[in-house]
Amino acid sequence: MTAPDAAPSTSLSGGAPARATVDLDAIAGNVRTLREHAGDAGVMAVVKADGYGHGLLPSARAALAGGASWLGVAQLPEAMALREAGIDARVLSWLHVPGTDFAAAIGADVDLSVSATWALEEVAAAARTLGRTARIHLKVDTGLGRNGAYGADWPVLLDAARALEAEGAVRVVGVWSHFVYADAPDHPTVRLQQERFAEAVREAEKAGCDLEVRHLANSAATLTNPSAAFDLVRPGIAVYGLSPVPHLGDPASFGLTPAMTLTANLAVVKRVPAGQGVSYGHQYVTQRDTTLALVPVGYADGIPRNATNVGPVSVAGTRHTVSGRVCMDQFVVDVGPGAEVHPGDVAEIFGRGDAGGPTAEDWAQATGTISYEIVTRIGSRVPRVHVGGAR
Ligand SMILES: *Cc1c(COP(=O)(O)O)cnc(C)c1O
């Protein structure tokens, strides 16, 4: 998966027609930037969903090289993959269902989030079997209405956790929660959630919990709201150099560098006359004699199908728009009559945007989504080519 000295935008990776080049120095640098924003708080780099599509292990190592002290994942198999690769940093896993192999997690020294008494009981049972103490972070719902103990369930969870602490089965090392408005730092719910969080922490401490870390802030809060940092911030998207608040600032304005560049080599370049329909359903028809370029990535590779006639793409250095329907494996670009393009030339679907090329954010805006979805959906068929950094 890694090509140490790959020339990212031009070299083919094992014959694959497209590649996502991931700059690990950018990831490490972004974490350094986030550390500055975090003040005295530590950084838990969120590497769930295959490092937001950038590759779990290289992203995790780059984040640690940039100074992250924790890694965060949604699912236990993600945490186990980090451990199996020999990564021994603190790891928190937070989204579990009944029947999860908590014994494996405890055995691998993974911190576990607990939001409900069923999870507390299962984690404690696993710890007893192993004769070990599980480290847990109790999650409080401060208003998101998603995961976390809500309202009167919180003191119940605290009491149950304290009883298991007394027994030695668990140790409550963290209390944490998650914001509703990831992208609107001025929304009134932000302050309200912060107050509820502080109150939940006070209740936990009053119940006798000796907390190591209190954590609430995602990327947006880390970048825009220092008062939410507590002991640890949990940025995800910003680690990969994308702005969580694009209406407030682009990555560069926050000192972030987009880590992923998606490129493909043109498979076919051909002249067609005016009036030629392009791709399934002929949703695009040439207005003049022109040149069509075939870009070999499609919705199976994570190119949104609703990018039809709107997705931006840079072909041989000039910006164009997807022409006609995005197919499973490919789409077409009308590059105009005078274009000097050839099979094998590079199409940049998105990247840093510094040379006028499109960004993941441009794709998000063109297709009515967020940059998170653009990068995490890049398919497994697209090789990740990791460059730079400590691998
Ligand atoms: C994904 C996630 C994060 C990271 O969010 P970003 O907006 O990408 O910074 C933090 N905390 C939790 C609970 C998450 O699920």
Image (cartoon, grey):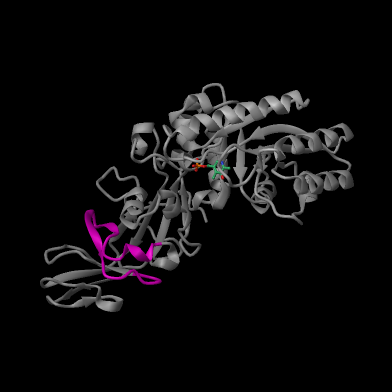
Q: Position of residue 301 (x, y in %)?
A: 43, 64
- Whether residue 310 is in magenta: the answer is yes
Q: Residue at x 56, y 21 (%)?
A: 40
Q: Residue at x 19, y 64 (%)?
A: 335
| The quadrant where residue 172 appears | top right
Query: Is residue 137 or residue 152 the one in the foreground?
Result: 152
User: In this picture, is 118 found above or below 273?
Assistant: above
Q: Is residue 15 visible?
A: no
Q: Is residue 208 visible?
A: yes
Q: Is residue 168 left or right of residue 102?
A: right
Q: Position of residue 256 (x, y in %)?
A: 40, 36
| The quadrant where residue 347 appears | bottom left
In which quadrant is the C terminus drawn? top right
Q: Residue at x 26, y 64 (%)?
A: 309
| The quadrant where residue 13 appears | bottom left
- Whether residue 233 is in magenta: the answer is no
Q: Is residue 191 left or right of residue 147?
A: left
Looking at this view, name the residue that lies furthest to the top.
Answer: 40
User: In this picture, is 349 found above or below 193?
Assistant: below
Magenta residues, as a range? 303-330
Q: Residue at x 76, y 45 (%)?
A: 117
Q: Position of residue 5 (x, y in %)?
A: 44, 49
Query: Is residue 66 or residue 311 the one in the foreground?
Result: 311
